[in-house]
Amino acid sequence: MTVTKGRRQRHPQAHAEKSERQHYRVKRAIFAVCLVLLAAALAALGTWQVERLAWKRDLIVRVDQRVHAAPVPAPARPDWNKVSAADDEYRRVTVSGTLANDKETLVNASTALGPGYWVMTPLRFADASSILVNRGFVPTDRRDPASRREGEVSGPVEITGLVRMTEPKGSLLQSNDVAADRWYSRDVAAIAEKRGVGAVAPYFIDADAAANPGGLPVGGLTVIDFPNNHLVYAITWYGLAAMVLALLVFILRGEKGDRGQPGRSSRSG
């Protein structure tokens, strides 16, 4: 009777231990699945960065070719709807027309020459359509057109520069205040509407470094810089994925070791 009683007392304890081990293994299995999913996500991010690296290198090559190519005529009005950043931005172009100096707009700028403004002026054509031209930089103390009359060229002009895409709404830190005529980005549509320009190209042109009368505005200050850290990012994501996989292997080996321990097998009976 004594032995039987002892066995009856051990059965509930053994059952509880077995249930606890099963619960522990289920939790560890769920954790392992989560690690697999995390490693897959990190590896996918690494692969995406590799693809971005290839895209960025191709972009740099294409832009370099465009910037140093001979200028071609700027996209004309019938082709305005075909202009895109992928196909046209930073393309070197030339265009002829008449500057509407009375409709110039000053856009806040920070350049190698210091703080000041970009002078955005409509270049008008015979059909009354226009292209906004960033004629270049003027310092803060020369923002008044009266202080740089020599640079307010009248009559037909020919301008060579780079095609740029419109910059809607404002900069990263500040939004354009159209009502107050304060501009932090070169938003073609908003500037054209504010100045009553009429039909305007959906892009603008950064004028090259050809000197303007009187020395202002100063053109040719376009900054072409494409940060290319994608390889570092890819290595980082792949490294994190490898670390997660190493942790998974460690857990799986621990599970295998637990199953092989004699003590655990004897207790399970």
Image: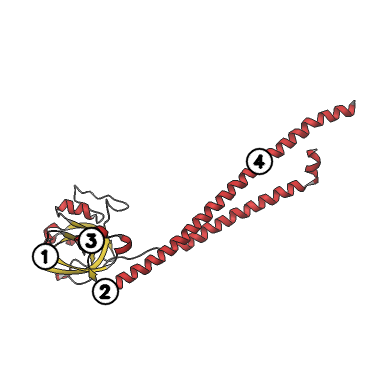
* Residue at the left extreme of this rendering: 155
User: Is 98 positioned to the left or the right of 12 in the image?
Assistant: left
Q: Residues within 10 Å of mark 2 (few under 14, many from 20)?
A: few
User: Is 22 positioned to the left or the right of 30 in the image?
Assistant: right
The amino acid sitting under disc 2 is: Ala
Q: Which residue is mark 2?
A: 70
Quadrant holding the N terminus = top right
Q: Against 22, is 108 above or below?
A: below
Q: Which residue is mark 4?
A: 26
Contact flag, marks 3 and 1 (Cβ < 8 Å): no
In which image quadrant can residue 67 be found? bottom left
Contact flag, marks 3 and 4 (Cβ < 8 Å): no
The amino acid sitting under disc 3 is: Asp
Q: How far, Cα to Cα, is label 2 from label 1?
A: 31 Å
**Residue 245 visible in the shown view:** yes
Residue 35 locus on image (x, y percent):
59, 49
Q: Earlier in the sequence, mark 2 or mark 1?
A: 2
Q: Nearer the viewer, mark 3 or mark 1?
A: 3
Q: Which residue is mark 1?
A: 149
**Residue 229 visible in the shown view:** no
The amino acid sitting under disc 1 is: Arg
Quadrant holding the C terminus = top right
In which image quadrant can residue 133 be found? bottom left
Q: Against 243, is 25 above or below?
A: above
Q: Residues within 10 Å of mark 1 (few under 14, many from 20)?
A: few
Q: Earlier in the sequence, mark 2 or mark 3?
A: 2
Q: Which residue is mark 3?
A: 79
Q: How far, Cα to Cα, is label 3 from label 4?
A: 64 Å
Q: Residue at x 78, y 34 (%)?
A: 14
Q: Residue at x 20, y 60 (%)?
A: 78
* Mark 1, secondary structure of its residue: helix
